[in-house]
Image (cartoon, helix red, strand yellow):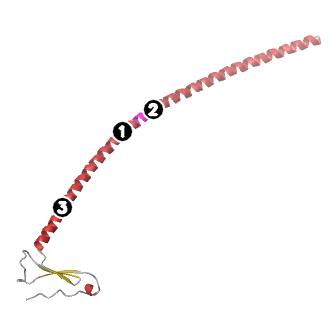
């Protein structure tokens, strides 16, 4: 008893590719172990496909995929760990450098405040000197004016 080929679907008649598997009727085996099937792909028939070998192949592929995925996961975990370590080292280095910068800035701030204070004090001293000189110039001007007035009186005979 032979099996009938699979019925053509609307997708096949519309030109869409399809893949259909149908079991071979018992007794039609050609001495191959495992289940045999007839594969129909776009109207072509492939016979004597060993399902057990196909399953073994697929399981082997899956096992290799799982091993590669596991290895990639392990590699990514290692890279994440190294990246975290580098980030921690960079944070530590950054904090040290910022501490050094703060120390330098504190020193500059101290020197700047000291310079400003010194400048203010010098300005105050200079203002006092100018006031003193202005006072002396005023006194000198009064004395010169008194001398000029005295000389004018002597000339006029008074």
Q: Is residue 144 magenta?
A: no
The residue beneath circle 3 is 64
With respect to residue 52, does 133 lie above or below?
above
Which mark is drawn over residue 109?
none
Mark 2 → mark 1, Cα distance in angstroms: 16 Å
Q: Which residues are magenta?
A: 98-102
The label nearer to you, 2 versus 1, is 1
Mark 3 → mark 2, Cα distance in angstroms: 59 Å
Q: Quadrant of the C terminus?
A: top right
Our reading of the magenta stretch's main secondary structure is: helix
**Which residue is painted at 65% across and 22% down in the image?**
126
The residue beneath circle 1 is 93
**Which residue is painted at 7% across and 83% down in the image?**
28
Q: Is residue 101 magenta?
A: yes
Please provide percent x and percent y for residue 21. Answer: 16, 80
Residue furthest to the right in view is 157
């Amino acid at each position: 008893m032979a099996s009938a080929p699979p019925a053509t679907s609307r997708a096949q008649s519309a030109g869409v590719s399809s893949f259909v598997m149908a079991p071979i009727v018992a007794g039609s085996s050609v001495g191959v172990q495992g289940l045999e099937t007839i594969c129909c792909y776009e109207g072509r028939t492939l016979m004597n496909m060993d399902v057990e070998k196909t399953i073994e192949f697929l399981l082997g592929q899956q096992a290799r995929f799982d091993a590669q995925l596991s290895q990639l996961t392990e590699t990514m975990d290692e890279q994440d760990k190294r990246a975290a370590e580098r980030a921690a080292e960079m944070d530590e280095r950054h904090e040290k450098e910022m501490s050094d910068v703060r120390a330098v800035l504190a020193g500059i701030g101290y020197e700047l405040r000291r310079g400003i204070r010194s400048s203010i004090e010098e300005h105050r001293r200079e203002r006092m000197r100018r006031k003193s000189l202005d006072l002396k110039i005023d006194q000198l001007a009064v004395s010169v004016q008194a001398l000029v007035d005295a000389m004018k009186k002597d000339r006029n005979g008074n």
